[in-house]
Image: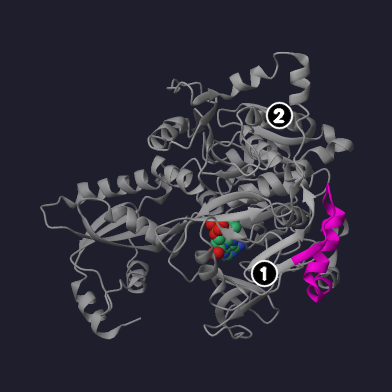
């Protein structure tokens, strides 16, 4: 076995850090472990601004948790209003760069004004606490404005990533029972317009409960506005300025005092069935833990310029572009477009231009950059950087080394942050002023997080053994339920090991207690750090008139970690495989979104199945792993032999 290098934090970093050295981490961790709810209650009182103090830290009727019951609070207030009484009021909250190069600098004071105005717009449309809003927007400042305006009134928001198709959007609008859709004409990606409003129109053909569509003008291209239903954001906003009193009132729109457990948002994520799950997050605990991890993991200081490259359509953007950083009073860079547009140095140009000090991205992005060579980052002054982060998938040693050497100049700490849509906030990660790093390991759990690795019977596996990663104690930003499906919530996360949260990841803990996350143990793929369900893509494929059966597996991919590979058996007919391959890829893009499009389609006469008729994805995974074919391909192969063989020998 090769020796794993260890990188302790530099003395200069430790000196400035919030948590200085391993002894300080251990002290914090041990203190939290003795009584996690008491630990969290203590910091909740210190770090959040409450309208009314809570009575109890945690009410736990497994698997249903209620944190900080009896308290009244508002997420938007904690992200905005409370900073206005401090010197932060004139600090940039958002530094925005659009893909075409347009820029906006929005202070906390100005962001507060924009959020209050838009909250008033929503109120004027008759929306109120408990209503649901779907948000389908490009990465422009009005996206966080929309989130925070909803949060201000207690409207439950659900952001749908702009890459999802009209079909996927429709399914989410229906499941949530949304009455309003907030969108834009479009956004910019690789110099082209992504037309969002068209997809909204398509998705609303049969959705009578949606009364209002509010459209922000971003690209200015022509579109249809349906009278009575569709309104321009700027028209509704202009109505607020009709007289000074109305305007002043709109700009002071008070934040509703909401219960700690008031639903903040629902975010749909892929599960092990064809239907996405609406992961429900609530208010106080979520804001607390996303904010605390900004300090613990990103060591956020008052003068930092922080940039997370995720899209707000995914959980990373919710927690680490909007709620965590704004609650912590950070200056956040926000970028609309693609990392390779107009050239592959866009990231480094942005870091140079805004003097970014904390940079948080995905291993997929890093691997794509490696391919472009060192000269691109080397030709920019990126010396403002002091901390690097990684999220979404395990980071391979080669990518870690390059990130450390070329971007970090061999001296910056890298925080490899393990968490999930369901955990809401970072759970396992180095504290950069304390934890010695090992490339590829998320290192140790954060204070208040009791993680373990167990076998299929729920018994701890011990040192250096592979097993299931579980969390033993409730934590404040944990998923509270699956929207409209408590049974699935119980079954999915809480049935394997009683009272413990089942992450769906395999992991190993080394002799220093460091966690090494190995990947998913269920039928969930990780493509570019985005979660995709094999079942969801399969069910899209079998809707196509030519397809008899479909089996989807993830195959290793040099850049995106995994890529989607679909095995297909066809109904009787005379098919042109090359054309049909193209058509089926397009079909998946239409049903789910372009990012779910299979990279590879393989036609076969039979799929390997167990005697009870279950498709053996494990075998297919082996096939795609051993004979790696790259690029969009369509092949025909005879799996009938394997199929026959396996049906005789394997019943797993
Ligand atoms: C799954 C969660 C959390 C934000 C983005 C993805 C994998 C995530 C790491 C990491 C190894 C990681 C896990 C996890 N994952 N971060 N640092 N090291 N694996 O959110 O779509 O909910 O996916 O991503 O497999 O279960 P998500």
- Give the colouring mode of the picture: one colour
Where on the picture, by quarter, is residue 549? bottom left
Q: How many marks?
A: 2
**Residue placed under numbered mark 1 in the picture:** 438
Q: Secondary structure at mark 2?
A: helix
Q: Nearer the viewer, residue 150 or 146?
A: 150
Residue at left 32%, top 67%?
627
**Which quadrant of the frame does ligand 1 lie within?**
bottom right
Q: Which mark is residue 114?
A: 2
Q: Is residue 140 left or right of residue 199?
A: right
**Magenta-tinted stretch:** 29-58
Identify the image quadrant of residue 289: bottom right
In the image, what residue occupies the spot 66% across and 41% down?
Answer: 129
Whether residue 551 is visible to the viewer of this picture, yes or no, is: yes
Quadrant where the image shows the N terminus: bottom right
Residue 563 in percent (x, y) is at 41, 57
- Report the residue at 86% width, 56% height from top: 45
Label 1's element?
A: loop
């Amino acid at each position: 076995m090769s020796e794993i290098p260890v990188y302790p934090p530099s003395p200069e970093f430790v000196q400035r850090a919030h948590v200085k050295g391993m002894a300080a981490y251990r002290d914090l961790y041990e203190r939290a472990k003795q009584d996690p709810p008491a630990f969290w209650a203590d910091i909740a009182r210190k770090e959040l601004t409450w309208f009314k103090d809570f009575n109890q830290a945690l009410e736990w009727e497994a698997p249903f948790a209620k944190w900080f019951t009896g308290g009244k609070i508002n997420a938007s207030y904690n992200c905005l209003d409370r900073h206005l009484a401090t010197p932060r009021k004139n600090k940039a909250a958002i530094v925005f760069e659009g893909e075409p190069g347009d820029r906006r600098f929005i202070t906390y004071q100005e962001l507060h004004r924009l959020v209050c105005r838009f909250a008033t717009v929503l109120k004027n449309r008759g929306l109120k606490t408990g209503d649901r809003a779907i948000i389908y927007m490009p990465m422009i400042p009005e996206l966080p404005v929309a989130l925070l305006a909803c949060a201000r009134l207690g409207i439950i928001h659900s952001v749908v990533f702009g890459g999802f198709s009209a079909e996927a959007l429709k399914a989410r609008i229906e499941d949530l029972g949304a009455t309003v859709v907030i969108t834009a004409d479009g956004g910019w990606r690789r110099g082209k317009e992504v037309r969002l409003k068209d997809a909204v129109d398509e998705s609303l053909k049969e959705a009578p409960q949606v009364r209002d569509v509010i459209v922000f003008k971003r690209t200015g291209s022509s579109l249809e506005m349906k009278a009575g239903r569709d309104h321009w954001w700027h028209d509704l906003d202009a109505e607020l300025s009709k007289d000074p009193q109305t305007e002043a009132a709109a700009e002071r729109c008070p934040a509703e005092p909401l219960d700690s457990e008031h639903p903040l948002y629902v975010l749909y994520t892929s599960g092990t069935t064809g239907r996405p799950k609406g992961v429900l997050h609530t208010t106080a605990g979520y804001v607390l833990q996303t904010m605390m991890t900004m300090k613990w993991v990103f060591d956020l200081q008052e003068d930092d310029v922080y940039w997370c490259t995720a899209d707000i359509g995914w959980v990373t953007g919710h927690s680490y572009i909007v709620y965590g950083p704004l609650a912590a009073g950070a200056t956040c860079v926000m970028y609309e477009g693609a990392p390779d547009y107009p050239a592959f140095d866009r990231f480094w140009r942005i870091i140079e231009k805004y003097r970014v000090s904390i940079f948080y991205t995905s291993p997929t992005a890093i691997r794509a950059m490696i391919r472009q060579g060192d000269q691109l980052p080397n030709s920019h002054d990126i010396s403002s950087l002091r901390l690097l982060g990684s999220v979404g998938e395990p980071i391979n040693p080669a990518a870690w080394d390059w990130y450390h050497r070329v971007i970090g100049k061999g001296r910056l700490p890298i925080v490899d942050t393990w968490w999930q849509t369901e955990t809401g906030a970072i759970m396992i990660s180095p504290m950069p002023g304390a934890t010695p790093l090992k490339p590829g390991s998320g290192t140790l759990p954060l204070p208040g997080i009791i993680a373990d690795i167990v076998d299929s019977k729920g018994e701890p596996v011990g040192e250096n053994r592979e097993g299931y990663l579980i969390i033993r104690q409730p934590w404040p930003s944990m998923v509270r339920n699956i929207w409209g499906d408590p049974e699935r919530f119980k079954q999915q996360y809480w049935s394997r090991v009683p009272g413990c949260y089942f992450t769906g990841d395999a992991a190993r803990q080394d002799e220093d207690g460091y966690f090494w996350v190995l990947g998913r143990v269920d039928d969930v793929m990780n493509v570019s750090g985005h979660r995709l369900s094999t079942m969801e893509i399969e069910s899209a494929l079998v809707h196509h008139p030519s397809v008899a059966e479909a089996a989807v597996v993830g195959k290793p991919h040099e850049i995106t970690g995994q890529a989607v590979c679909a095995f297909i058996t066809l109904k009787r007919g005379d098919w042109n495989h090359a054309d049909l391959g193209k058509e089926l890829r397009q079909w998946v893009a239409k049903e789910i979104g372009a990012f779910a499009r299979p990279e590879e389609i393989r036609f076969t006469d039979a799929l390997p199945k167990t005697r009870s008729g279950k498709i053996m994805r494990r075998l297919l995974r082996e096939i795609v792993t051993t004979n790696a074919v790259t690029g969009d391909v369509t092949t025909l192969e005879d799996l009938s032999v394997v199929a026959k063989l396996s049906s005789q020998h394997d019943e797993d």
